[in-house]
Image: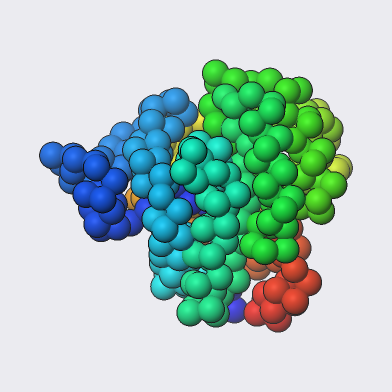
Amino acid sequence: MSVLINLHSHLEGRVRPSTAADLAPALGLVDPPEGWAAAIALDAPGTLTQYLVRVAATYPFFRSAEAVRRIAREAVIDAAASGQSHLELRFGPATHADDANGIDEIVRAACEGLRDATAITGISAGIVLAALRHHDPETNELVADAAARAAGSGVVGFDLAGDELLYPALEPHTGSFAIARAAGLGITCHAAEAGPASAARQAVELLGATRIGHGAHIVDDPDVLAWCADHGVVVEICPTSNVFTGAIARLDQHPEAAFRAAGVPLVLGDDNPMQTGSDLATERTVLQRAFGWQDDDLAALDRVSVAAAFLEPADRERLHSMLS
Ligand SMILES: [Zn+2]
C-alpha cells in the first residue's frame, strides 16, 4: 500500500480561497477583482522572486492568531481529505508577528490548529518553523527560540526559506540553526533551488541540515551530488514547483533521475499547492507519468519518507506499519 507523506509544504501555500474571502472583511482587505483563487494562483512559470510574490498574497491572512489557527486546521483537513497520511507544514512566523501577536502567539495558534485537525482526521502532522533569508540573524534567532519552546507541542523542525537569488548567504543564520539543533528539532534548508550546488553542501556543513528543500541544482556539480549521496542527504523534491520558480525549464528536465542514479534519497512535497494547482497526490502522479516511476520506485520513496520525516517515535511506527 502506498502512503502519502508530504515533507515539503508551506502553510502560506495552503490557504483556501474561500477562507481568504471569509477572513478578508474582518482584516480590512478588499477582495481582488479577479477573486482570491486567481490572486493566489500562479498563471505561468517565472522566477523564484515572482513565485514568492504570489505566496506573499496570503500574508495578510496571518495577521490574526485565530485566522492562523483556522488556516493550519484547514490545511491538515485538506491534506487528509486528499489522502495524505502525514503532513509537515512549514512557515516563517516572524513575517506575520506584530505588536498584537508575537512570534510565540502565532506559533501557538498554528500548533493549536494542527492539534484540532489531527484529532478530527487521525493523520499526523508537524510544524517546521522557517527562518527567512531576508531577515536579520537576531530575528531568526527569535524564531529559533520560539521553535525550541514549542518543540514537543507541535513544532518538529527548522528550515531556512525565502529568496535564494537575492539572499544566498548561509553564514548569517548559523546562530538560529544552532538553537534549533540544541532543541532537538529536525533540520532542513531550502538550498540549491535557485543557487548553485555548493549551497546544499554548505547547508549541511554550516547549518546541520539532514534534508535539503528542492536542491534542483545539486546535480549540476557531480562532486556535490556524490557528496550528498555519501552523506545520506535527503532531498525534498517538488517537481511542479520547480517549473513555476524557473529552477527547471520543463518537467522533463527535473533532475530526479540523476539523483536516483547517484543514490541520493528522495522524499516528496507539494510546496505551495494553492499557487501551483498541484497537490501531493498530483505530484506523485507526476513521478509516475512524467518520470516513469514504477511501484518499486514509489515504495522506496515511501520508505525514505517514513525514515526522514521529523516525527515522534510513535508516529513513525504508525507510518511504518502502513508501508507495504
Ligand atoms: Zn519550499
Quadrant (top left, top right, bottom left, bottom right) of the N terminus: bottom right
Where in the figure is residue 273, as x and y percent of width and height?
Answer: 41, 51
Q: Is residue 249 left or right of residue 226?
A: left
Is residue 23 visible in the rendered image? The answer is: yes
- State the residue at coordinates (52%, 57%): 110
Reply above or below: 264 against 131: below
**In this orientation, which residue lies closer to the viewer: 4 or 179?**
179
**In this orientation, which residue lies closer to the viewer: 130 or 206?**
130
Quadrant (top left, top right, bottom left, bottom right) of the C terminus: bottom right
Q: Quadrant of residue 212?
A: top right
- State the residue at coordinates (64%, 24%): 136
Where in the figure is residue 195, as x and y percent of width and height?
Answer: 62, 24
- State the residue at coordinates (48%, 79%): 120
Where in the figure is residue 253, as x and y percent of width and height?
Answer: 51, 36
**In this orientation, which residue lies closer to the viewer: 173 or 287?**
173
Is residue 292 visible in the rendered image? The answer is: no
Q: Going by the picture, which residue comes out furthest to the left?
A: 33
Q: Is residue 300 left or right of residue 98?
A: right
Structure colour scheme: rainbow
- State the residue at coordinates (44%, 36%): 243
Reply above or below: 141 against 126: above
Counting labels gives 0
Reply above or below: 231 against 320: above
**In this orientation, which residue lies closer to the viewer: 105 or 144?**
105
Q: Going by the picture, which residue comes out furthest to the front?
A: 100
Where in the figure is residue 9, as x and y percent of width and height?
Answer: 52, 51
